[in-house]
Image: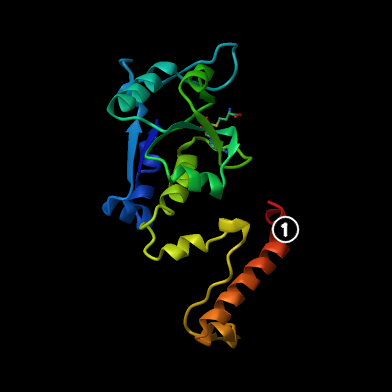
């Protein structure tokens, strides 16, 4: 799949996509992530992409023209399944939305900055509005990075052991079981015996019990979903 991120601060997130699993996904050709500098799309001679808000409010507002030119340039190259705007008043991002979006071919994520974007962009270009939580960030870049990470890591083949993504928290509305590594005893703190038993059936049963117990205790709301 392909994700196009539109931002006024590409440098905020470029490094993020060049590390670890997201880098490997791109190297393997399983995901393409392209970051576009909105300033490259304005015709303004000073490359300005924001202006004062009508009504005398505080803060600066992102202008329509560069956003329209950027989205149209991308759409001229390929069809997009969604043009997403990240915004605190959008639908809350969650695992099931990440699962759905990971099945798409091409998506655009538009990052706001400053006071926000001219509302007409939202009315005329955006197909989906997503929030990553009830707090306000300085810009949408981290939200776009959070979404892209969650979406890309579950594309089949990205994580070598596919089971590993499926047994993570929130798949099936359950929290994950604890994990341990060597040594089996440290400072007298022992790894649960069952994990050293080699008995696969017993280990699976333990994993499910732990998931259920932790979900009941820490996130009972998930069990009602
Ligand atoms: N004035 C706006 C907030 C602007 S914050 C309001 O009160 O709703 C600047 C930009 O950061 C936003 O346009 C949005 O793209 C991004 N942003 C901030 N918080 C976010 C969140 N919780 N989820 C997704 N994007 C967010």
Q: Quadrant of the N terminus?
A: top left
Q: Residue at x 54, y 36 (%)?
A: 130
For label 1, the crowd category at 10 Å Cα-Cα, with few meaning under 14, some 14 to 19 and many 20 or more, is: some
Please tell me in which quadrant of the rendered image residue 54 appears: top right
> At which x and y percent is residue 203?
55, 79
User: Residue 225 location, x and y as percent?
Assistant: 68, 51
Color style of the picture: rainbow
Would you place residue 74 above or below residue 51 in this image? Answer: below
Q: Is residue 221 left or right of residue 33?
A: right
Residue 218, compared with residue 98, is above or below; it is below
Image point (47%, 42%), residue name:
142
Residue 20, percent from left and from top:
36, 58
Q: Quadrant of residue 194?
A: bottom right
Q: Which residue is mark 1?
A: 220
**Looking at this view, is 186 or 166 the one in front?**
166
Residue for point 30% across, 30% down: 78
The answer to whether 141 is drawn above or below residue 159 in the figure is above
Q: Nearer the viewer, residue 202 or 108?
A: 202
Direction top: furthest residue:
55
**Ligand 1 appears in which quadrant?**
top right
Q: Is residue 91 left or right of residue 68?
A: right
Disc 1 is placed on an element classified as helix
43 relative to 153 in the view: left or right:
left
In the image shown, does 213 or 49 lie closer to the viewer? 213
Q: Is residue 19 above or below residue 183?
A: above
Q: Position of residue 68 (x, y in %)?
A: 39, 19
């Amino acid at each position: 799949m392909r994700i196009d991120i539109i931002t006024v601060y590409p440098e905020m997130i470029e490094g993020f996509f060049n590390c670890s699993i997201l880098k490997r996904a791109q190297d393997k050709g399983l995901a393409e992530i392209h970051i576009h500098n909105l300033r490259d799309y304005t015709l303004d001679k000073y490359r300005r992409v924001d202006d004062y808000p009508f009504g005398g409010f505080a803060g600066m507002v992102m202008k329509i023209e560069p956003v329209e030119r950027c989205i149209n340039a991308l759409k001229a190259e390929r069809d997009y399944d969604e043009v997403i705007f990240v915004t605190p008043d959008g639908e809350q991002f969650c695992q099931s939305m990440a699962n759905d979006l990971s099945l798409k071919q091409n998506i655009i994520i538009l990052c706001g900055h400053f006071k926000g974007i001219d509302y007409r962009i939202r009315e005329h270009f955006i197909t989906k509005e997503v929030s990553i939580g009830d707090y306000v960030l300085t810009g949408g870049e981290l939200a776009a990075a959070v979404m892209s990470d969650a979406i890309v890591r579950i594309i089949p083949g990205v994580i070598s052991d596919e089971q590993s993504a499926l047994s993570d928290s929130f798949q099936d509305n359950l929290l994950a079981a604890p994990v341990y590594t060597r040594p089996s005893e440290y400072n007298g703190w022992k790894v649960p015996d069952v994990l050293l038993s080699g008995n696969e059936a017993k280990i699976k049963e333990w994993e499910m019990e732990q998931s259920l117990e932790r979900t009941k205790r820490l996130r009972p709301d998930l069990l009602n979903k």
